[in-house]
Image (cartoon, rainbow, N blue to C red):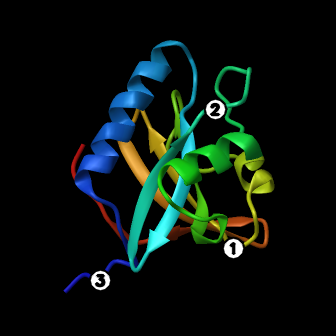
Amino acid sequence: MYMADYRIERQELNTAFRVAKRADIRGREICGMLVRQGNRLLLIPVKNASKSLGSFSIATSHMLIALSAHGLALGQVEGTYHSHPWSPAEPGETDITGADNGSLMLILSCCYKDVRLWRIQDGEAKPVRFIRSRI
């Protein structure tokens, strides 16, 4: 039997993809935090603070507001998620260098209709298994 390291609810992934596709029309990325509860990852949306097309930035103030709205603490954050409007669901160099060592990164690719989870460790992205729904 296939054992995944993490589980993400179908509804959360579908919602994130709908929002990402709307942002994609404007060349924007969506972003948020991954919060772990047991083996489940919650996707907590955060306003993209980046003004540049095809990039994301999570401002500390936006992150704290989003966590507070969901009754969560900073210590529960396992990593981030974001969309790629025009590229595969693989972290780019700036994604990797901007991530905390040991953190998770979920990437939703709008053009490839794919989603992948990564662990960023020592400057490298390593795939992580998770249960996901079809999109």
Task: Please state which amino acid type lies under the numbered disc 1.
Answer: Gly
Quarter of the picture holding the C terminus: top left
| Residue receiving disc 2 | 48
The answer to whether one can see residue 81 in this image is no
What is the distance, in whole Å, between disc 2 and disc 3 at their CAs? 33 Å
Disc 3 is placed on an element classified as loop
Is residue 52 rendered to the left or right of residue 21? right
Circle nearer the N terminus (3, 1): 3
Between residues 36 and 131, which one lies in front from this camera angle? 36
Label 3: how many Cα within 10 Å (few below 14, some 14–19, many 20+): few
Left or right, 72 with respect to 132, comes to: right
Residue 104 position in % (x across, y down)? 58, 65
- The amino acid sitting under disc 3 is Met
Q: Is residue 38 left or right of residue 29?
A: left
According to the picture, the residue beneath numbered tag 3 turns out to be 3
CB-based contact (under 8 Å), mark 2 and mark 3? no
Residue 75's x, y, as percent?
65, 71
Mark nearer the viewer, 3 or 1: 1
Where is residue 38? Give x, y as percent: 40, 80
On the image, numbered disc 1 is attached to which residue?
102
